[in-house]
Amino acid sequence: MGQERIVSDKEFAEICKRFNEYKVEYITCGAFASKLHGIERVSGQVRFTTDMDFIVKRSKENVKRIKRALRDIIPEIEELKLQDLGQYRTTKIVSSKYDIDLTSNLWGVDYEKAYKEKVIKEINGVKIPVVSIDHLLEMKKDSFRTRDTADTFWLTKIKEKQKESNKVY
């Protein structure tokens, strides 16, 4: 088994830029959502990840957009079918360079629900729709993975700090 490759912010921003250019209906979730909400700043630790996670709208047109956005860098994307997004909890798109997870519903948070509370963050000048802290906590709360437990801890701290800063004195 080979060594897993860490995804850089630059690579992540490039995928999001392509999604934006092709008008893919997506929202970032997973580790990059945690990073974009500020867990590295609050924890003082780097949050590494080996993949990119996205909640995508489950529609025939959106699947076409995803394929157009990625086909020249991930030829394997041509195998993606609309039914994959409903049949499997997560559809993995794996190539020699990228590991992308697409889902239309993660732990009860679907694209429409996530879209209503999304926030826009930015990496390398690319505007990125990101799942809200509340939805991210909902997705990670029952995870058995140590990194998700740590993310949940730090996301809760961020949420507490946000509440504190919104208090009127």
Image: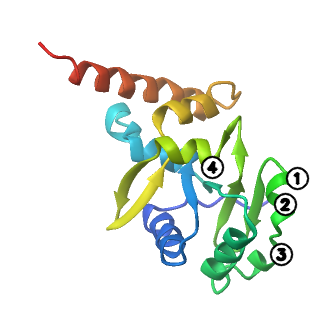
Residue position marked by numbered label 1 in the rendering: 87
In the displayed structure, 139 sits above or below 53; it is: above
| Upstream in sequence: badge 3 or badge 2 | 3
Q: Are marks 2 and 1 in contact (CB under 8 Å)?
A: yes
Q: Tell me the mark number nearer the camera, choosing from 3 and 2.
A: 2
Disc 4 residue type (three-letter): Tyr
Given residues 90 and 105, the one toward you in this image is: 105
Q: Residue at x 22, y 24 (%)?
A: 165
The quadrant in which the N terminus is found is bottom right
Q: In which quarter of the image is residue 147?
A: top right
> From mark 1 to mark 4, how far is it between C-alphas?
16 Å
Disc 2 residue type (three-letter): Asp
Residue position marked by numbered label 2 in the rendering: 84
Residue position marked by numbered label 3 in the rendering: 79
Judged left or right of residue 61, residue 168 is left
Judged left or right of residue 21, residue 107 is right
